Amino acid sequence: MGVQSPSLQSSLFTLFILSFSLSLSAACEMGFYKPVAGNGLCGKCPHHSHSETRAALSCPCDSNYYRAADDPPAAPCSRPPSAPVNVISSVNGTSVNLEWDRPQDTGGRSDLKYSVLCQKCSGEGGPCGDCASSPGGAGGGKAGGGASASVGGMVERLGTAAVRFVPRQTGLTEPWVTVLNLVAHTNYSFRLLAMNAVTHLSNEPSTYALVNITTNQAAPSEVMEIRQQNTSQNSVILLWHEPNQPNGVILEYDIKYYEKENEAHSYSTLKSKNTSARVSGLKPGTKYIFQVRARTSAGCGDFSQNVEIQTGKAAPLRYNTMTIIWICMALVSGLVTFLAIFICRKRQGYTLPHYPSLLHCGYSKAFQDSDEEKMHYQNGHVSFPDARFYIDPHTYEDPCQAVHEFAREIEASRIKIEKIIGSGEFGEVCYGRMRLPGKRDIPVALKTLKAGYTEKQKRDFLAEASIMAQFDHPNVIRLEGVVTQSKPAMIITEYMENGSLDSFLRRHDGQFTVIQLVGLLRGIAAGMTYLSDLGYIHRDLAARNILVNSNLVCKVSDFGLSRVLEDDPDAAYTTSVSFHIEGGKIPIRWTAPEAIAFRKFSSSSDVWSYGVVMWEVTSYGERPYWNLTNRDVIKSVEEGYRLPAPMGCPGPLHTLMLDCWQKDRNERPRFCQIVTVLDKLIRNPENLKSMDTLCSLNSPPLMERAIPDFSSCNSVNDWLDTIKMSRYKDHFAAGGYQTLGHVISMNQG
Ligand code: ACK
């Protein structure tokens, strides 16, 4: 930079002083303004404003730019923002969560707010109307005007239906909103608008981001108004309306009731096919609490609010001697009947002799095995079952209809197949990515139906998707959707990074802590609790059918072999031992004896299989019963042989396995009890240090008699290594069993 001479510097300074004194006294030039005429300074017009004449007192905004009422004249002019971008929607049943990014153009302001307009559309590409104008939807409102805004998540009501916006519908300051109470299986269109304090000054139509979603199936909404019609000493007649949002055909209502003073000890339920019920057998002069909920094929809605009703007071009776004799006789005969029923039930296996402290988790046996209309749950810790039932897709004539009842159809163009990861029963299993509108792409597993399939294969293939679609549990594999409109047909599920549990364990032999292994088992038991509570029997529970994700979460999968509960739990089958069920092979090593012999599959036979999975997990994927033949496995189990504890397996875990392998299925624990036992072990890991197999609480220790298979072994130590019993080497040596011959003679002795 050059150096200026002193004379040039002084003339520049004089020029500056001159122009400053001129601006104090003179009128402002174009492009400048001065709010008050006089000696004040002229200011340059703020951004996006101008002055077209000299001596302007203000600068009006350029076209399409505005100043809000509160903006000072010196503030730049601004304009409405552009639309929000990158909208992501996630549908959860009948609610949707919308998230977005700030608009690219904020209009030059920082007072950005958002509003949501909701439209309900009829059918694919059909006309859309304001959510508020149709039953089952409300609260669309005019976002701009904010007239129908519901602040702080308040419910907006229209007629009988209500859509909720959380935290609110308009004036959102954060870029997200959750919309609740939509109608199931319905298309919705949401417009997201960004606004600022000048939006209302613009005549231009607001730009918005559009997102279309389809809601999924959902349980019915809450039963709202319960009234009593007639209350006597011993009974009450209740009436109610169908829920505002049935979300399907209401199959029945559950009426739950209990004595107000006795809530902690017992309650009863009654089922009704219509919107009224007579509840009888109540005590006179007693306050009862009643609640009602509806059930559709999608599950149970929430229970209604409590309704308190007091039964009429008993009129004092005066008895003569004859009446007293009659009452005594009635009581005695009642007692006899009660005892007869009690004994009968005990014979049918309604008792739970095991795990006395764990009786109260979910369904009673009575509920699982019979379709009683009225159930009583005794004792304080009973949780009311979420009485959802699994629907067997085989009951549908058309498998495509069934699959679309439960699962969503995905356009093949949304799937990118990246690699083949294995082969399934019906075709290849692939890894791919799925991108749904407005969502990030997600990794998925794709089971394909190979070309040249038969109708039966297609039916079975789609049946698995229909079954999977009905489940929603963190330990059960999640179905994303199906492709049936183009070929190859595909079942799309969440992707499980670590593949199937058996091969995963073999790849990581000896690498996990006992607690980690118990954690895997706990997940499987939780998934099975959920499935068995739905009345679903897996029939092929094995480590190969459990998938593991990157967080080591285990999920039950493979619903191909499964069948619905037999209608009559006591119906006997006469078939002799068969290795086939309905064309599929019975996985003998994993299957309970009664299921092999009489096809008596039940949740208890799934528990047997679970015991084998426990063994597989604790032996890091060893083959159950090693290389014994199927026939020998059946024979050995029948004779009382049970798998020994794998090397390093803590005693309590082996005890639990032995309990799962009780011959009498009624003696086996239920899945919810297994979860509780495992939870206790996880909470008290010191119990897992015990290597001794403890005897089961109620049953004598089961015979442990390892059946040696020496075909591939050269020495006793080799053989013990093969069967993961190396820890017994010293015992064998000390006992003088030096050769395999000694072992054989021990076994025969
Ligand atoms: O042991 P894997 O890797 O795990 O090989 C089998 C193969 O496909 C054939 O069934 C794998 N597989 C099946 N479903 C999934 C899934 N959802 N995520 C990841 N891998 C899967 C299984």
Image: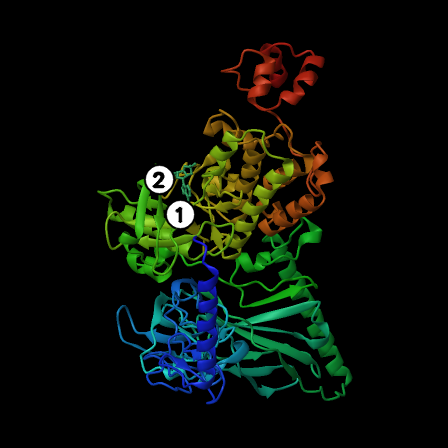
- Occupied quadrant, residue 122: bottom left
**Residue position for label 2:** 424
Q: Residue at x 67, y 69 (%)?
A: 334
Q: Are marks 2 and 1 in contact (CB under 8 Å)?
A: no
From the top left corner, tell me how far across and down residue 462 is, in percent. Answer: 33, 51
Q: Could you tell whether 474 is left or right of 205 in the image? A: right
Label 2 or label 1, whichever comes before in sequence order: 2
Q: Quadrant of ligand 1?
A: top left
Circle 1 SS class: strand
Q: Amino acid at mark 2?
A: Gly
Q: CA distance from mark 2 to mark 1?
A: 19 Å
Q: Quarter-wise, where is residue 638 in the image?
A: top right
Give the quadrant of the C terminus: top right
Residue 699: name its quadrant.
top right
**Residue 408 in sight here:** yes
Q: Nearer the viewer, residue 413 or 313?
A: 413
Residue behind mark 1:
443
Label at residue 649: none
Q: Around disc 2, counting alpha carbons within 10 Å, would you say few (fewer than 14), some (14 to 19), or many (20 or more)?
A: some
Looking at the rendered structure, the kind of residue marked 1 is Pro
Q: Which residue is depicted at the point 52% across and 63% down?
A: 387
Tell me if I can see residue 133 in this picture: no
Check disc 2 and report its element: helix, strand or loop.
loop
**Residue most toward the left?**
452
Q: Position of residue 634 (x, y in %)?
A: 50, 32
Q: x and y percent of residue 543 in the render?
A: 49, 38
Residue 491 vertical placement versus 74 (above, below):
above
Closer to us: 190 or 217: 190
CB at disc 1 and ligand 1 closer than 8 Å:
no
Which label lies toward us, 2 or 1?
A: 1
